[in-house]
Image: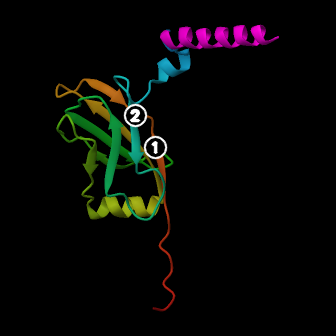
Amino acid sequence: MGAALYARAALGILAGVAASLLPWPESASSSASGGVGEPGAVALLAPRGVIRGVPSRVVWLTAVPARRVRLRIVDDLGESLVERSPAIDPGRRELLLALAAPERARLERAGAGRVELALMASSGELLALAPPARFTLRPPEPVDGW
């Protein structure tokens, strides 16, 4: 019985070593959607979820060396609330939003929005498109007399 146990352990170790030498299999869903580390992939980090006030910046994660960004914030009906297409440095992963008073008022009235981000080359060629990220504005907390 002892020899069978050792043989089974040796086979398990050899199978583990052999498996570690093989490349990791990719499923069709993971290669189609792409991870953030893959070329052409981009993930929106902020704003998303419930936030305290009108967003002041948009942050993303990508390996794409984009020269231009196309940003849209739309409401639930698809109406554009904010739209920007600035040139950026290739390593930049953040866009500050200097909102005009009408844009700020539209965002506050909407109470929620969807951020759409496209990364482009300086020629205008689309390099990457982020899946939209939703956010909801939290109403200001009431002051209790202080």
Q: Residue at x 61, y 9 (%)?
A: 15
Instruction: Describe residue 114's horizontal placement relative to residue 19 as left or right.
Output: left
Query: What residue is disc 2 on?
Result: 130
Mark pair 2, 1: CA separation: 8 Å
Residue interval drawn in magenta: 1-21
Q: Residue at x 50, y 65 (%)?
A: 138
Indicate the amino acid at tag 1.
Answer: Ala
Asked if residue 9 lies in the magenta stretch, the reply is yes
Which quadrant of the figure contains the C terminus?
A: bottom left
Query: What residue is disc 1 on?
Result: 133
Up/down of 101 relative to 141, above or below: above
Asked if residue 46 lies in the magenta stretch, the reply is no
Please tell me how crowded label 1 is: few (under 14), some (14-19), or many (20+) other residues with Cα within 10 Å: some
- Image coords of residue 144 (percent x, y): 51, 87
Residue 120: numbered disc = none
Q: Residue at x 35, y 38 (%)?
A: 61
